[in-house]
Amino acid sequence: MADLTGSIAVFGATSGIARAVALRLAGEGASLVLIGRDGAGLEALAALASLARDSSGAKDGGPGISCVTWDVLDFGGHAESFRALTAAHTMKGVFFAVGTQFPQDECEKDPAKARLTFDTNLTGPVVILDLFAAYFRGRGGGFISCISSVAGERGRGKVLTYAASKAGLTAYLAGLRHRLAGTGVFVQTLKPGFVRTRLTAGMESPLMAEPAPVARDIVRALAARREEVYIPGIWKWIMLIIRNIPAPIFRRMKL
Ligand SMILES: NC(=O)c1ccc[n+]([C@@H]2O[C@H](COP(=O)([O-])OP(=O)(O)OC[C@H]3O[C@@H](n4cnc5c(N)ncnc54)[C@H](OP(=O)(O)O)[C@@H]3O)[C@@H](O)[C@H]2O)c1
C-alpha cells in the first residue's frame, strides 16, 4: 500500500474504543479529523489529542487535530458531508467505530430499535465507507479500518439483532477488500470481544478488556496491515470453537 500523506478520519471518535485509538494515533504524531455527533465531546477529545500529538517527537507534518460533526443516520447528508470533509482535508485513512446495541427483547418489542441497530451498525457505515473507498481508489491508496465484532461470526439468540447487523458489516468489509484488491487501498476488519465501554455498561465477563490495550492492539494491527484481527487475540480461538459447535448442541446453549 502506498504510504500517503494526509489525515486519518476517526469516525465515532467519542466511543470508548475510538477515543483510546485517537489518543494513541495522536501520540504517534498523526493528524486526525475526529468525527461524531457530539460536538462538545469531540472538542474535548481534540484538546487531549492535540496535547498528545504536540508532545510526541514524531509529528507527521500535517495539519494536526480537527473535528467534524456528522451523524451516521443522516442519509440525505452523507454525500455533502463527505464532499465538505475532503474539500477541507486530504485523507489517507479512516478508522470507523460507530455502533449501537440494545437488549434483544427491546429490539423485539420496538421495531424502531431493531431498525436503528441496522442503520447505525450496517446501512450508515456501508454508505459512508463506500464514499471513502471511491476517494481512496481515486488517490491510488489509503486505508479503511472498521470495527465489526466477534458477535457477527455466528447468529445467537441473546444478541440476535446486533449479531446480524455485525455479520452484515463483516461480510461488507470482506467484499470491499475483494473489490479493492490491487487498487492500493487496504481494508481491515476488527473483531473485538468484550470491551469496557458505554456499549457494555452493566455487563460483566472475565474476558472484559480495557479500551487502552485494545487500542494498542488496533494501532499495531493497522501498522502491520493485518486484514482480519481478533482483539484480544484469544478470541480467534474462542470463535473457532463457537463456529464449530454442532447446531443441535449450540441451540441448547444460552448464548
Ligand atoms: N464494547 C464492546 O464490547 C465491543 C465489542 C465488539 C465490537 N464493538 C464495537 O466497537 C465500536 C465502538 O463501540 P464502543 O464499545 O467503543 O462503544 P461506545 O462507547 O458506546 O461507542 C459507540 C459510538 O457510536 C457512536 N454513534 C452511535 N450512533 C451514532 C450516530 N447515529 N452517528 C454518529 N455516531 C454514532 C456514539 O456516539 P456518541 O458518543 O455521540 O454517543 C459512540 O461514539 C462499535 O461499532 C461497537 O459495536 C464493541
Image (cartoon, helix red, strand yellow):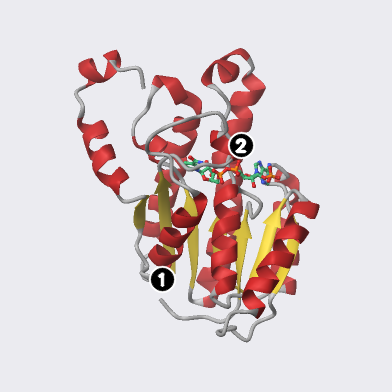
What label does residue 119 carry, if any? 2
Q: Is mark 2 within 8 Å of ligand 1?
A: yes
- Find disc 1 in the rendering and name its residue: 223
Residue 183 in the figure: left or right of residue 249: right
The local secondary structure at tag 2 comes to helix
Residue 57 x %, y % = 56, 85
Closer-to-camera residue (95/130): 95
Mark 1 to mark 2: distance in Å?
A: 30 Å
Closer-to-camera residue (13/148): 13
**Residue 28 visible to an observer of this rendering:** yes
Closer-to-camera residue (143/198): 198
Residue 210 in the figure: left or right of residue 71: left
Image: 220 above or below 109: below
| Residue 109 position by quadrant | top right
Q: What residue is at 46 percent from the left and 38 percent from the top?
A: 166
Q: What residue is at 66 percent from the left and 23 percent from the top?
A: 112
Q: Quadrant of the N terminus?
A: bottom left
Q: Earlier in the sequence, mark 1 or mark 2?
A: 2
How many numbered marks have been drawn onto this rendered protein structure?
2
Q: Amino acid at mark 1?
A: Ala
